[in-house]
Structures are given as C-alpha cells and as structure tokens.
C-alpha cells in the first residue's frame, strides 16, 4: 500500500509524545514492504522549539535511530493534497491544522480513492471538546482513538462503528532492556511539566516519596518554569532538561526504577489510557511504580507488571522496597516486559491497523492488493 501520515512532526519529540509511537508504527509498516511517507508542516512549533533550544544537533538522535523513515514537509495545503493522489491510506493526526483536516476530507468526499482516517491521541475531546468538534471530519471514513473511553466520546458524536480503539505501544526495536546490565542507581522520571495541572501529584507521588526513600531522582522533560525548577531543587531532584526519546532506553538502563504520574484528564475523564511512557518503560525492563490510574481495559496486570501506590505514603513504601529488594525489581522487570512483548508492541498495532483497513476497504476504492494487508 501507499500510506501517508500527516503529523505535527515526525522529526521532533519536543513536547510531542505522539512522535514516539508514530515512528515505531511507520518503521514497522516500511519493513513490511509498504510505501510509507510522513508529512509535517514546515512551521511545526515542536520542531521550532527543539531547534531553538538545541540547534540542528537536537535532531541527531532521531536521524541516527530512524534512518529508514521518510518524512517530508509541506508549506501549502495544496502540496499535501497533491501527495494524496496515488495514496491508498491517509491518516491525519489530531494536532494537524484544521484547514488541512477539512481539505483532506473534501478531497475524499469529492472522489478521492483513498481510505481516510482521523487519529486522536489527546484529551481535548473531553478537556476542550469544542476544539475537536470544530474539525470538519465530513468525508472521513473513520476515527482511530487511543483508548476505549475516548472512542466512546466519538460514538456519542455519531461515529458508531466507524471509530476504532488503537492504543499506543512500544517500539521494541529501540525500547528494550540493555544487552549488558550495568550499575543502576536512583530513580528517573521522564515527563513534561505541561500546564501545571498535576503539580500537586508530582510533589506527592514523585518528589516527596523519592526524598523520603533516600533515592536520588533525575527528572527529564520540557516546559519547566522557574517555580517548577525551584520545587525540584527543594526536594533535591536533579533537572536534566529535554531528553531525545531515542536516548530514553539508555537513561532507563542507569536507574533502579521509574514512576508514572498520569495527567488529571487521564485519571478523571479518560480512564484506561496510559501514556506512551508506561509502554516504553516496561519494554525497557525497568521497574515501574504508578500513581493511581484505572486500567479499565485490562491492558496490564497491576501489581505484577508494575506496582500501584494509592497515595504518597504508599509510594514511599514501594520505593524503599525496590531500593533494597533485587528479586522484586527482577520480577517486575520480567513481568512488564512479558506483557509488552505479548500485547503492546508497534508490530501489534500495525496488525490491528491493517485489519481495520482491510475491513473498511470499499469496492468503490481503487484496486489495491489487499492480500498484502491481510
């Protein structure tokens, strides 16, 4: 198949977690023989922020890790539409320009012989629904939603059986345990500060427990304002700044454990949707402790694949146990890795995508060798 994916950015993961999953999926599709191209706007703010902070060298990790990916930029919507003329499948991410989203829908509605899917991996459908409903999705064949609770929102909006649950997953070509175990020390947290909506949770489930457990803490991420950095310093945490996602496995490999602190919307309004960091951490074989979130879809085995801390005091207890119990760390690492490899790799998600595409292919679409996607 000829597959196009319109993303905010493939090259930059600066405050752009969708790039993690997308890179792994596009790589797997390419390895299976599909002609895959990502298109990103010329003025993507994630890329601009990355270059402003780190210059061209900030792209080195992506280029070194994914030399086989084809990504192109477009300056005008007309260029994007031209690329779709010979496409079989076009997927458009939710961070795309609404004008582009509408133009692609019109092209499909006016005779475009490609399957057109909208891909939503964010909480805006519940946190800012008017922004999502402002998208003109007339002409789209279906929606890919990264969790059942998000898919349910689209069903209420009238999408019925044309919305499909398509969770994120780990790219295990990159995210895996180290081939040779080295010395591990302390804790690591990789996460962006965001808009301050989980400041209290970060303090209660990350900073205070790490300090009380006597474990050094490294923090990676972007958008940390001065007050956030002051808060980290008060607890003795070391702020390391932005981390290129391909470098995350080697950082995980140097630490005893990591912590998941979900954003408020994924706890209260979209339960059951973990962030990409949960998949990636477990794939790397690092023990994980989670602040409360409800795994309503049964993606993992809470208490087996990772520990759950109902409050800050319990988090401190878990961290103390992990610091001194080698068997506990080994058990969690092995179980989490087993679940990822059995159910949550990018290859699994490609299988799911191709099954969706094959089921949706309409006789009116141009002839495609569908046996290649079965």
Image (spheres, grey):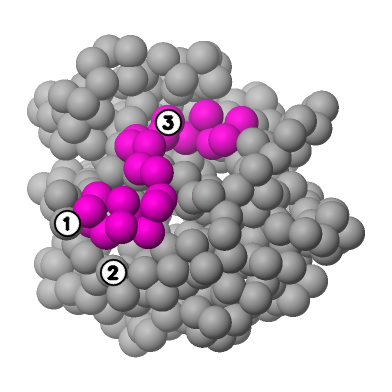
- Regarding residue 183, the answer to whether it shows in the image is yes
- Characterize the local packing of mark 1: few (<14), some (14-19) or many (20 or more) Cα atoms within 10 angstroms: few
- Mark 3–mark 1 CB contact (< 8 Å): no
Q: Secondary structure at mark 2?
A: helix
Residue visible at 52% across and 62% down in the picture:
210
**Residue corresponding to mark 3:** 244
> In the rendered structure, does residue 239 fall within the stretch colored magenta?
yes
Magenta span has 187? no
Q: Is residue 212 left or right of residue 43?
A: right
Q: Earlier in the sequence, mark 2 or mark 1?
A: 2
- Residues tagged 2 and 1 counted as in contact (Cβ below 8 A): no
- Mark linked to residue 227: 1
- Residue 282 drawn above or below residue 65: below
**Front-most of residues 80 and 182:** 182
Disc nearer the start of the sequence (2/3): 2
What distance separates the C-alpha of mark 2 from that of mark 1? 10 Å
Secondary structure under tag 3 reads: loop
Which image quadrant: the N terminus?
Answer: top right
Q: Nearer the viewer, mark 3 or mark 1?
A: 1
Q: Is residue 86 visible?
A: no
Residue 255: image x %, image y %?
63, 43
Q: Secondary structure at mark 1?
A: helix
Asked whether, in this view, residue 309 is left or right of residue 306, the answer is left
Coordinates of residue 154 in the picture (x, y in percent): 35, 77
**Mark nearer the viewer, 2 or 3:** 2
Pick the front one: 115 or 309: 309
Instruction: Classify 118 as above or below 97.
Output: below
Report the magenta residues as a range. Answer: 228-251
**Which residue occupies 52% across, 29% down?**
247
> Residue at the spot x=64%, y=60% of the render?
288
Which of labels 2 and 1 is toward the front?
Answer: 1
Q: Which residue is mark 2?
A: 199
């Amino acid at each position: 198949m000829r597959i196009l994916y319109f993303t905010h950015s493939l090259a930059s993961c600066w405050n752009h977690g969708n790039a993690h999953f997308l890179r792994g999926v596009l790589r797997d599709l390419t390895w299976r023989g599909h002609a895959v191209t990502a298109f990103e706007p010329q003025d993507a703010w994630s890329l601009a922020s990355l270059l402003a902070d780190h210059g061209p060298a900030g792209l080195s990790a992506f280029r070194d890790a994914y030399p086989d990916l084809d990504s192109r930029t477009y300056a005008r919507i007309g260029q994007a539409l031209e690329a779709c003329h010979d496409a079989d499948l076009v997927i458009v991410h939710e961070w795309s320009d609404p004008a582009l989203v509408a133009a692609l829908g019109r092209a499909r509605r006016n005779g475009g012989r490609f399957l057109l899917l909208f891909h939503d991996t964010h909480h805006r459908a519940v946190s800012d629904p008017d922004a999502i409903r402002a998208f003109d999705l007339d002409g789209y064949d279906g929606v890919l939603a990264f969790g059942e609770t998000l898919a349910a929102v689209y069903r209420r909006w009238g999408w019925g059986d044309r919305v499909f649950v398509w969770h994120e997953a780990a790219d295990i070509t990159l995210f895996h345990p180290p081939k040779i175990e080295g010395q591990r020390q302390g804790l690591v947290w990789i996460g962006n500060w965001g808009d301050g909506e989980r400041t209290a949770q970060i303090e209660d489930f990350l900073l205070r427990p790490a300090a009380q457990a006597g474990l050094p803490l490294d923090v990676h991420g972007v958008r940390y304002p001065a007050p956030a950095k002051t808060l980290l310093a008060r607890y003795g945490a070391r702020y390391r700044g932005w981390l290129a996602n391909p470098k995350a496995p080697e950082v995980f490999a140097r630490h005893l454990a990591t912590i998941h602190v979900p954003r408020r919307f994924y706890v209260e309004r979209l339960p059951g949707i973990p962030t990409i960091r949960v998949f990636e951490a477990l794939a790397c074989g690092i023990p994980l402790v989670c602040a409360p979130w409800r795994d309503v879809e049964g993606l993992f085995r809470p208490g087996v694949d990772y520990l759950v801390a109902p409050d800050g005091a319990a988090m401190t207890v878990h961290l103390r146990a992990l610091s001194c119990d080698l068997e506990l760390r080994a058990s969690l690492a092995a179980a989490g890795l087993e679940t990822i490899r059995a159910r949550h790799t990018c290859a699994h998600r490609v299988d799911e995508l191709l099954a969706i595409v094959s089921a949706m292919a309409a006789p009116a679409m141009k002839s495609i060798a569908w046996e290649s996607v079965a």
